[in-house]
Amino acid sequence: MKEYLTKNNALTLMTLVAFGFCVYFGVSKSYEPMWILSLLCFASLVFANLDRIKRFKVDKSGFEAETREIVKEARNTIKELQDLSKIMATITLGLVKRTGRWGGGYSYEEKEDLRDSVLNILLQIGVSDEECEEIITGTKWHQYVELDYVHHLLGGSHIPSSLPEEKIGEWKQLRKRGLNNLPSPEELTRFLEQCELLNPNMKELIEDYEHYIRFREQRRPSVWKDRGNWFSFLK
């Protein structure tokens, strides 16, 4: 297809150049044969672009080419391509975000890079920023990051050694909350304060969590990368 388009465009360009010379010499130099060549060039130009013209007619007013149907079909095709791409992007990013969450699979950074690459392709084919954000929302991309925040803020896979025994039940309930009902930064602050675990390090981590909820970015990427060791602050 690429080769065909290249030849087609080259033929069109050469025909236009030849047509321009024919018109110039036919008008300014009064070379009668040039008008015949002009008509031949014009016919060649039409022939080179027949695939772009739905129908045409020649009448007293000259040549009329109508491409409305072709344009309509092209727009429909582009719209269908965009719709299909959005569906595939939602599925792909959803699977990527859910894969290897607790070890193995893609790292957090690799997932972020894949997301940005997919969104960049969507933008290139005409999908709007708003539609891209809807795709990310549909994959629950940010909610999974927030879930990781809650998980690690509460000790990850460790039961905090200083956690009061009477608070273990509440601790488990907070960890079980689903994506659509995750504990807020305020709830975690109150819980850790009640458990006497709200030290300066934990306050900073909760601020990181709140920052991500508001701005959808990591406030301290290096600290986030070391989230597997946050449990050491719960002492």
Image: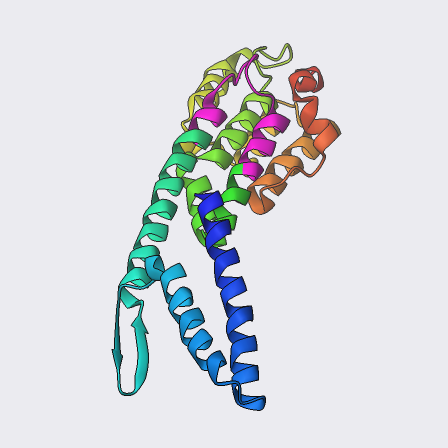
- For the point 27% across and 63% down, which residue is it? 54
Where is residue 107 drawn, in percent x and y? 60, 21
The answer to which image quadrant residue 195 occupies is top right
Where is residue 119 drawn, in percent x and y? 52, 42
Camera sees residue 199: no
1 and 43: which one is in front?
43
The answer to which image quadrant residue 44 occupies is bottom left
Q: Quadrant of the C terminus?
A: top right
13 and 163: which one is in front?
13
The answer to which image quadrant residue 227 occupies is top right
Q: Main secondary structure of the magenta part?
A: helix
Which color scheme did the rendering employ for the protein?
rainbow
- For the point 64% across and 9% down, which residue is it? 161
Q: Is the residue 226 above or below the residue 158 in the image?
A: below
- For the point 58% across and 14% down, which residue is it? 164
Q: Which residues are magenta?
A: 94-117
- For the point 71% across and 19% down, which residue is it? 233
Where is residue 35 drawn, in percent x and y? 45, 81
Within the magenta stretch, is there residue 106? yes
Q: Is the residue 123 above or below the residue 97 in the image?
A: below
Within the magenta stretch, is there residue 61? no
Tell whether 66 sits left or right of 93: left
Tell whether 54 sits left or right of 139: left
Tell whether 22 sits left or right of 66: right
162 and 40: which one is in front?
40
Where is residue 231 drawn, in percent x and y? 66, 16
Q: Is the residue 55 above or below the residue 195 in the image?
A: below
Camera sees residue 171: yes
Q: Quadrant of the N terminus?
A: top left
Q: Is the residue 79 above or below the residue 212 in the image?
A: below
